[in-house]
Amino acid sequence: MLKDKSALGQTGLEVSPLCLGCGSYGGSMKEPLAVEMMDYYYELGGRFLDTAVIYCDWFEGERSSSQNIIGRWMQARKNRKELVLSVKGCNGKIITPTNDLATAPRTDTRLHREDIIEDIEVSMKNLRTDYLDIFTLHHDNESVEIAEILETLQEQKKRGVIRAYGCSNWKVERQREAYDYAKAHGLDGFMVDQINWSLNVFAPGSKGAASSTVMGPEAYRFHQETGIPAMAYGANGRGYLHCLANGLPVREQDHKEYDCPQNEKILAVLKQAAQDLGVEVNTLALGYLMQGHGFQVIPIVGIKSKKEMEIAAAAADCHLPQEVLDQLSQLRGLNG
């Protein structure tokens, strides 16, 4: 299912079509289940993992638990050289764990030279490795000059401790500034962008709808113009469409974020297509992300069971008919 790899943009890295999101490891997902999920992903051919320094520091217990669990797993399986690690750093530091990311107080995003170097070194220690494949800046801090950020990242690549670098949760105007600076100064620049993107649309008035760092028409055009690959986090859309399609309970917060007529129309198209093709709705929702955008998209998926893994992995082999893609693209409204 996941054995076919492809070049990730201009990074020089070969990656699986689906990236395993490890953001809950050591928090809501304890180590034994996390290890089981990594083992099964690996068994299916997956070799691309995503983690961050801050995961899951909002819980009491081991700091950077996600990275440490992955590090112990790689050490036990002796498979580091086979894997591509996408590592986010330079977020704010959690001050007091509250068991809830939304309420845990943290420092401002740290993006100065010493912060970048610190989080690369910390990540390598946690992951039991001497290099990171992709180092991604988890959030932006617009008070820090683009020159300092990019020159530091390029220096770290030259040192050999990172192989490529990218950004996450950056506004399009700052990404464009970074893109132009890199071109003008002969730097690699951001080679990937991690962005909140699923087939679901955010309901008017929701927190997601107010965000300037989710995939919208402006960001979509930027990716088409530059060809920078998008790593789509939240690619499952919190399982909202899957739950509705299968009569499963939906969390109140998810209703607030996604309950709108547009998603009802998207779900109707997906249900009919799923019936016609004999696949799960969530397989199609991920398949939509992986086809026909004019730039490469790698969904990042958090998985809690082998069944969920199989449904997600099937998207790599699922080719949506052009008629369905056109309907979903029109409903999703990114070309406008």
Image (cartoon, rainbow, N blue to C red):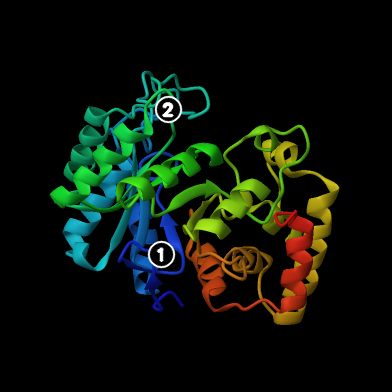
State the mark number for residue 55. none
Residue 168 pos. (x, y %): 45, 43
Q: Is residue 120 above or below residue 10?
A: above
Q: Residues within 10 Å of mark 2 (few under 14, many from 20)?
A: some
Secondary structure, mark 2, is loop
Considering depth in this image, is 308 or 142 the residue closer to the camera? 142
Left or right: 132 in relation to 249: left
Residue visible at 79% across and 58% down?
331
Secondary structure, mark 1, is loop
Instruction: Report which residue position mark 1 lands on.
Output: 9
Q: Is residue 185 above or below residue 98?
A: below
Q: Residues within 10 Å of mark 1 (few under 14, many from 20)?
A: some
Considering depth in this image, is 175 or 97 the residue closer to the camera? 175
State the mark number for residue 141. 2
Left or right: 54 in relation to 270: left
Q: Amino acid at mark 2?
A: Asn
Left or right: 282 in relation to 171: right
Q: Is residue 36 above or below residue 4?
A: above
Residue 204 pos. (x, y %): 78, 37
Splitting the image into 4 quarters, where does residue 92 fall?
top left
Residue visible at 36% across and 62% down?
48
Residue visible at 67% across and 56% down?
199
Q: Is residue 314 visible?
A: yes
Q: CA distance from mark 2 to mark 1?
A: 25 Å
Residue 135 pos. (x, y %): 31, 47
Splitting the image into 4 quarters, where does residue 117 fall?
top left
Residue 110 pos. (x, y %): 34, 27
Q: Amino acid at mark 1?
A: Gly
